[in-house]
Image (cartoon, rainbow, N blue to C red):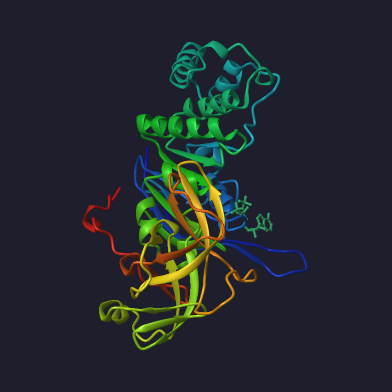
């Protein structure tokens, strides 16, 4: 087990007859010994390329990669003591589960057969697949195959686990079960792990820390809770959270933010945080939009319900602002979303007052996307620093 250090890691793919592609751009992240880092971002942001550089399957254009105290840029993959689990389980179809799990140890170590057998038995027990050891992959469900793929990685007793979307071929229920199992396993084994996903539920629930990438560049590395409540920029704010944060473009007029559909007066304390930014992106998470009775307060707005999306425990309510004397529903307008308790009855066409409390708002510089002000947290001091 070891600390993993990415220091300015860069990957440029040369294109024949075209521009070079900078797939990973100056990426610096430390993963402490035994910790679980989730690498998350949209398709094409460079997650897999990063993982493949760590594994040694892709050369490093620039920067330094270390495992423990050793720089491994030029160390071949088989000598890096890393085990990788892929989305496609990549099991050998003609071998039994036991043979699949033993194969790597037989090929790359001098371990005696009896010890290999014991190691495989231990891993199989840990994963609850002891009774499947004589079966072939074709006779297993997707979840069982994924456990075998994990078992094959575990028996190698690596310094680092790399996992590339390992659960994405499983159905939703099994995925959530395997998510918990994987976390428990990683904690028990205490192996430094980098886990790639584009699924932000996995990112939020699994990692000690998450690194959010966009366009090859690191946007933020933080605990999931920090990334959610204290996003470094608009990209992170929009990427983390489902439904996504609501955004409105505004222009500043003194201490008032003027959007196309509403005006939002700021306290002088909040206005001070904006510095001299003129154009400000206003953000609020759906669960922070309240529906209230009155409608005359500074941060209360007349709205009409466009669509209600019942989720069972909660409703996603799509709202549109309604100005004085306006037609009730302006179809061409983008609605914004509020998340309310599923017990609350509300229907399309209802006129409601939405309150957006100042404590809950996020403000970003519209030009750079950088967060100028994040929501206040009651328990800010209690944010876990994992
Ligand atoms: P996904 O979630 O879709 O797998 P990703 O975040 O893993 O995406 P990468 O596969 O790392 O993204 O790709 C990052 C960028 O590098 C993309 O623009 C991709 O087109 C480019 N790229 C990846 N491999 C190569 C290659 N061998 N040659 C040229 N460009 C490549």
Please indicate, yes or no, whether residue 130 appears anywhere in the rendered image: yes
In percent of width and height, residue 277 lies at 40, 84
Taking the image as four quarters, which one is ligand 1 found in?
Answer: bottom right
Please determine whether, in this image, residue 261 is positioned above or below residue 192: below
In percent of width and height, residue 253 lies at 40, 88
Please indicate, yes or no, whether residue 106 appears anywhere in the rendered image: no
Q: Please tell me which residue is depicted at 63% across the width and 16% down the height of the picture.
A: 96
Which quadrant of the figure has residue 7? bottom left
Which quadrant of the figure has residue 46? bottom right
In percent of width and height, residue 137 lies at 65, 21
Which quadrant of the figure has residue 145? top right
Which image quarter is the N terminus in?
A: top left
Q: Nearer the viewer, residue 265 or 329?
A: 329
Q: Nearer the viewer, residue 189 or 11?
A: 189
Q: Please tell me which residue is depicted at 47% across the width and 22% down the height of the picture.
A: 127
Q: Nearer the viewer, residue 242 or 53?
A: 242
Q: Nearer the viewer, residue 317 or 190?
A: 317
Q: Please tell me which residue is depicted at 27% across the width and 49% down the height of the picture.
A: 384
Q: Please tell me which residue is depicted at 43% across the width and 86% down the height of the picture.
A: 278
> Given the current orientation, which residue lies at the most extreme right position?
17
> Given the current orientation, which residue lies at the most extreme bottom position?
254
In percent of width and height, residue 105 lies at 53, 23
Report how many numbered discs are placed on residues in the image: 0
């Amino acid at each position: 087990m070891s600390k993993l250090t990415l220091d300015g890691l860069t990957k440029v793919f040369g294109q024949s007859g075209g521009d070079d592609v900078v797939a990973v751009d100056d990426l610096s992240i430390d993963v402490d010994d035994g910790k679980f880092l989730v690498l998350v971002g949209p398709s094409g942001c460079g997650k897999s390329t990063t993982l493949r550089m760590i594994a040694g399957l892709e050369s490093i254009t620039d920067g330094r990669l270390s495992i423990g105290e050793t720089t491994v840029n030029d160390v071949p993959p088989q000598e890096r003591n890393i085990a990788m689990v892929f989305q496609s389980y990549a099991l050998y179809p003609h071998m039994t589960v036991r043979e699949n799990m033993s194969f790597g140890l037989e090929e790359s170590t001098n371990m005696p057969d009896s010890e290999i057998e014991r190691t495989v038995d231990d891993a199989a027990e840990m994963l609850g697949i002891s009774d499947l050891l004589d079966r072939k992959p074709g006779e297993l469900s997707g979840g069982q195959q994924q456990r075998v793929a994990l078992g094959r990685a575990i028996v190698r007793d690596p310094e680092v686990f790399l996992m590339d979307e390992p659960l994405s071929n499983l159905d939703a229920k099994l995925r959530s079960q395997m998510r918990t199992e994987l976390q428990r396993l990683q904690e028990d084994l205490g192996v430094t792990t980098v886990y790639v996903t584009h699924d932000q539920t996995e990112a939020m629930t699994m990692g000690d820390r998450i690194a959010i990438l966009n366009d090859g560049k690191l946007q933020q590395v933080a605990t999931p809770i920090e990334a959610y409540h204290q996003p470094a920029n608009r990209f992170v704010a929009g990427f983390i959270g489902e439904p996504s944060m609501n955004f409105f473009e505004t222009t500043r007029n003194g201490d008032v933010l003027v959007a196309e559909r509403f005006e939002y007066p700021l306290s002088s304390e909040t206005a001070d945080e904006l510095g001299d930014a003129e154009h400000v992106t206003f953000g609020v998470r759906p669960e922070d939009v309240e529906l209230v009775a009155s409608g005359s307060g500074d941060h209360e707005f007349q709205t009409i319900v466009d669509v209600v999306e019942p989720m069972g425990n909660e409703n996603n309510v799509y709202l549109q602002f309604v100005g004085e004397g306006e037609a009730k529903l302006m179809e061409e307008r983008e609605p914004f979303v509020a998340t309310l308790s599923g017990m609350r009855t509300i229907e399309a066409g209802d006129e409601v007052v939405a309150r957006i409390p100042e404590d809950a708002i996020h403000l970003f510089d519209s030009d750079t996307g950088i967060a100028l002000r994040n929501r206040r947290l009651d328990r800010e001091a209690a944010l876990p620093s994992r």
